[in-house]
């Protein structure tokens, strides 16, 4: 049940927002094994003149930039899966946005299961409730 936030330093574009959300949802399912039916994605466009790298705006740099953060329950993915996710999403967004600055980020945030949830239940509670009762 990941919550994903995506900030993109390009002009607002509803088509791009939908395409980016679908791409992130698909990759999160393929690589991290997360259920796309409970994956939420919030896309925010940041004006190019307000995104800075090394003191220069993206307008000056003349490339796009992005920051993607996915929150997952701690311990549910391996280091290799997370590394593949970071590399794949960086490459995907480089293609999707027509070239991104190297200082674009993918952050996999491992969150404790007892401190994260949806629908009013933590992931820890969901896990406990799914376990068979010991006889």
Image: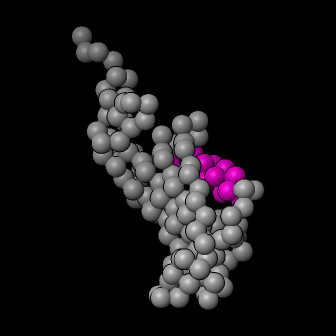
Residue 98 in the image: x percent, y percent?
Answer: 72, 74
Looking at the image, which residue is at 43% across and 35% down? 118
Give 84 or 89, whichever is nearer the viewer. 89
Image vertical order of residue 73 relative to residue 93, above or below: above
Magenta stretch holds residue 59: no
Residue 128 in the image: x percent, y percent?
Answer: 31, 26
Q: Residue furthest left?
A: 135
Looking at the image, which residue is at 39% across and 56% down? 109
Looking at the image, which residue is at 59% across and 56% down? 43
Residue 38 in the image: x percent, y percent?
Answer: 54, 37
> Which segment is the magenta one?
16-33
Give 18 or 134, whichever is nearer the viewer. 18
Residue 76 in the image: x percent, y percent?
Answer: 39, 45
Looking at the image, which residue is at 30% across and 46% down? 112
> Is residue 9 left or right of 12 when viewed as pictured?
left
Is residue 84 visible to us here? no
What colour scheme governs how the chains and residues are painted in the rendered image of this protein? one colour
């Amino acid at each position: 049940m990941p919550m994903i936030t995506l900030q993109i330093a390009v002009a607002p574009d509803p088509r791009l927002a939908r395409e980016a959300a679908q791409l992130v949802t698909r990759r999160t399912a393929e690589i991290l094994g997360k259920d796309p039916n409970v994956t939420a994605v919030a896309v925010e466009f940041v004006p190019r003149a307000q995104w800075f790298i090394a003191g220069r705006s993206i307008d000056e740099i003349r490339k796009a930039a992005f920051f993607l953060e996915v929150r997952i329950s701690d311990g549910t993915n391996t280091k290799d899966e997370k590394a593949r996710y970071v590399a794949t999403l960086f490459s995907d967004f480089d293609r999707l946005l027509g070239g991104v600055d190297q200082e674009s980020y993918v952050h996999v945030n491992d969150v404790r299961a007892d401190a994260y949830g949806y629908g009013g239940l933590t992931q820890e509670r969901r896990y406990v409730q799914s376990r068979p009762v010991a006889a």
